[in-house]
Image: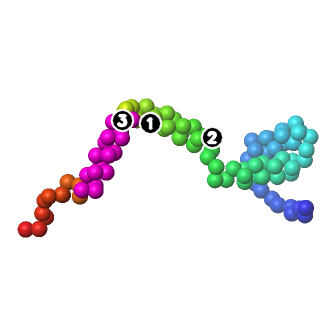
Amino acid sequence: MASTKVTFTLDAATISRICDAAERLSIPKSAVVREAIEEFHERIGLLSERERLRLLRAFDEMVPRIPLRDAGDVKRELRAIRESRRSGGRRSGCSTKS
């Protein structure tokens, strides 16, 4: 793979992390940067850990709010709604024209 030399301006903490990772992994600093960019690129479009946790908290808050009802009650209510729609709903038997 052909390499292209580039220049970036990075803060001291980032440089320190790159150097530390390169030393601990015994690989060149450029390899650390390449791998970090590759991993970052794969995560584009995925939820961050913070966003994932925020959504899980929202889910945990909403689930208890779901009313617990007997399946028979739900079926009866749905049947009543369907029958009402088939018969014209609340307007059946009423004329809207004067």
Please tell me how crowded label 2 is: few (under 14), some (14-19), or many (20+) other residues with Cα within 10 Å: few
Q: Quadrant of the C terminus?
A: bottom left
* Of marks 1 and 3, the one in the foreground: 3
Identified at 63% across, 40% down, the residue is 49
Q: Quadrant of the N terminus?
A: bottom right
Q: Is residue 33 visible in the rendered structure shown here?
A: no
Residue 73 x, y percent position in the rendering: 33, 36
Magenta stretch secondary structure, dominant: helix
Horizontally, residue 11 falls left or right of residue 60, namely: right
Q: Earlier in the sequence, mark 2 or mark 3?
A: 2
Give the camera-side residue of 61 and 8: 61
Q: What is the C-alpha distance between the residues marked 2 and 1?
A: 20 Å
Residue 31 part of the magenta segment: no
Q: Earlier in the sequence, mark 1 or mark 3?
A: 1
Q: Which residues are magenta?
A: 71-87
**Amino acid type, residue under disc 1 in the picture:** Met
**Amino acid type, residue under disc 2 in the picture:** Glu
Give the camera-side residue of 94 and 38: 94
For numbered disc 1, what is the local secondary structure?
Answer: helix
**Amino acid type, residue under disc 3 in the picture:** Gly
Q: Which mark is residue 72?
A: 3
Residue 92 x, y percent position in the rendering: 18, 57
Q: Which mark is residue 62?
A: 1
